[in-house]
Amino acid sequence: MSLVASVHVGFADRVEHRLEQLVAERPGAVAEAGGQTLRSGGKRLRPLLVSMCATEAAREGDHLVNAGCAVELVHMATLVHDDVLDAAPLRRGHPTVWQTGGRPLATATGDALFSLAFGELTGTGDIGAVSLLAAACLSLARGELLQRRQAGDPAVTEEQYLERCALKTGSLFSAAARLGARLSGVDEVDAAALGRFAEALGLAFQIADDVLDCDGDPDTTGKPLGTDLLDGTVSLPLLLAAQRDVEVRAVIARGAAPADVLPTLARVVGSGAVADARERALGLAARAARELDGVTAPIDRDALLDAVRIASDRTS
């Protein structure tokens, strides 16, 4: 997200510094594992959404930094817990906490990051902001359960997939945008529009991620191709391909082995499913941009439109 970060680099630096403080405050194994997760990097798109959906004057205070840290800590926690559930050895090219420390440490680390998030957000003194993030976390949990229920089912529909992604990805994007708006005094009509913008952006971001898992460059993405296929996650390209190719459908239904990955992904690409998924991402990006049309608050519209362009055309 370099184009967006260049506009909000001061805010991003303050969030990063505060995150480092938070994960190091209580020395021990969990703090070390939290630091390991933080150092693995990431785009920090959710904190940037907090900043971009706020007014310039509000960025000078500390409350937006509190909120930016809170949403990123929640995101980090979900990644650590996802790695436990998926038994994932790598995240962004780095060993996961699950790989280096085992399930108990990874579970405790994720729990600690969640706790730090809400402790940090209380620094705003805004109980409504805490409630907003809590609702997003409930949606994240519901989305994770739905993903597990849909695992290995080639009959998952596009509508069911989008429902899952709205819960698991869109909800935290939306919460980040609404927190930025709320904490800078943006009125509720504009705040709601920014929340819808961010949800559509999150869906575009997730579909682009699904596409990379089928047709990306592992050296760029930091993870091998076919992760979704191997763990049974029915992503948009996989479900579209399953509707068109009985061989793809059969592999999803029985569970893929490592030897299945490259031949199956070749069939997915050949079916046109990857190209169609890209088109869906572009359509959601356009929907996100339209949500900004009626927003009158003095937020950073140009940076938000940059985020739309970058999120829907990802290479990593």
Image (spheres, helix red, strand yellow):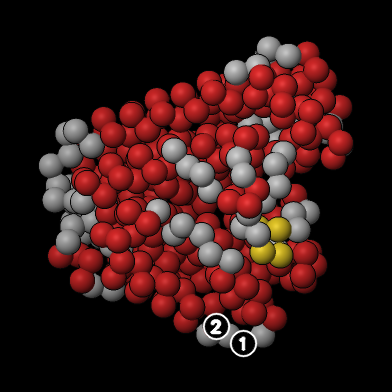
Q: Is residue 229 left or right of residue 281?
A: right
Above or below, comparing residue 287 to residue 182 in the picture:
above
Above or below, comparing residue 159 to residue 295 in the picture:
above
Q: Secondary structure at mark 2?
A: helix
- Along the line of sight, which residue is nearer the eye, 252 or 219? 219
| Residue depicted at x 53% and y 21% | 276
Please indicate, yes or no, whether residue 3 appears anywhere in the rendered image: yes
Question: Of all residues shown, which one is farthest toward the bottom?
Answer: 27
| Residue depicted at x 31% and y 66% | 9
Q: Position of residue 153 (x, y in %)?
A: 75, 25
What's the distance in space between the residues labelled 2 and 1, CA to CA?
6 Å
Q: Position of residue 144 (x, y in %)?
A: 63, 43
Q: Is residue 222 left or right of residue 292?
A: right
- Along the line of sight, which residue is nearer the eye, 283 or 141? 283
Q: Position of residue 298 (x, y in %)?
A: 13, 51
Q: Is residue 51 left or right of residue 68?
A: left
Please indicate, yes or no, whether residue 181 appears anywhere in the rendered image: no
Q: Is residue 121 left or right of residue 137?
A: left
Asked which quadrant contains residue 292, the reply is top left
Q: Which residue is the site of mark 2? A: 24
Q: Which residue is the site of mark 1? A: 27
- Along the line of sight, which residue is nearer the eye, 20 or 266? 266
| Residue depicted at x 61% and y 87% | 27
- Along the line of sight, which residue is nearer the eye, 97 or 312? 312
